[in-house]
Amino acid sequence: MHILLAFAPFIAFALIDRLVGSLAGLLAGAVIALLLLGRDWMVQKHSPKILDIGTAVLFSGLLLYFLIAKPVWSVIGVRLCVDCGLLLIVLISLAVGKPFSLQYAREHVGREFWESPQFQKTNYVISSAWALAFAVMVIAELSILLAPKLPRRFGIIVIVLALVGAVKFTGWYPERVRR
């Protein structure tokens, strides 16, 4: 469940971006990301997670850019930037050999399993599934930007299916591996 909490800044961004606007959405994402980082670091005494650090940097950086450069972005354009950043965070975590899901999985698995090849592989697979979901989201958003006649509903459906698929896979795959 903690892995889903890590996506709270993105959920807040999406909702507020849609209801109020991109600036407010980026601000909400940045504030929630920084609060989650602070909570883990100061209150729960956990070391910061890759996804949490990346999310805080992503939203704070985009907010700062938005305030300084005042770009003229469409709602989909801002969401594309956010989702590209999220995809990049996940891909970097995989490239450096620290799949982002590993830190969350360690909170639910005994220390004796942390170095096992099966545990490591499971987290590479789960993080890769999330990378695939984020890549699908980026492609859907690019499609909407490049093909304006494409119904927005198409993009929303694809994005929701990608996210639901990643969530379900994250719950299903470890159980499959255990059997």
Image (cartoon, rainbow, N blue to C red):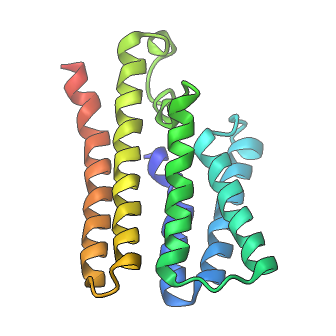
Q: Quadrant of residue 142?
A: bottom left
Question: Residue 177 in the image: x percent, y percent?
Answer: 24, 22
Taking the image as drawn, is residue 178 in sight? yes
Is 67 displayed left or right of 5 in the figure? Answer: right
75 vs 175: above or below: below
Question: Residue 69 in the image: x percent, y percent?
Answer: 77, 79
**Residue sitting at 55 percent across and 35 percent down?**
93
Is 39 displayed left or right of 151 in the figure? Answer: right
Question: Residue 96 in the image: x percent, y percent?
Answer: 58, 27
Count of numbered tags? 0
**Residue sitting at 71 percent across and 58 percent down?**
34
Is 142 displayed left or right of 73 in the figure? Answer: left
Is 48 displayed left or right of 107 in the figure? Answer: right
Question: Residue 175 in the image: x percent, y percent?
Answer: 23, 29
**Residue sitting at 25 percent across and 71 percent down?**
157
Q: Quadrant of the C terminus?
A: top left
36 vs 173: above or below: below
46 vs 80: above or below: above
**Please, which residue is most extreme toward the right here?**
68
Q: Quadrant of residue 58?
A: bottom right
**Camera-nearest residue between 107 and 56:** 56
Q: Quadrant of residue 139?
A: bottom left
Taking the image as drawn, is residue 103 in sight? no
**Camera-nearest residue between 169 and 158:** 158
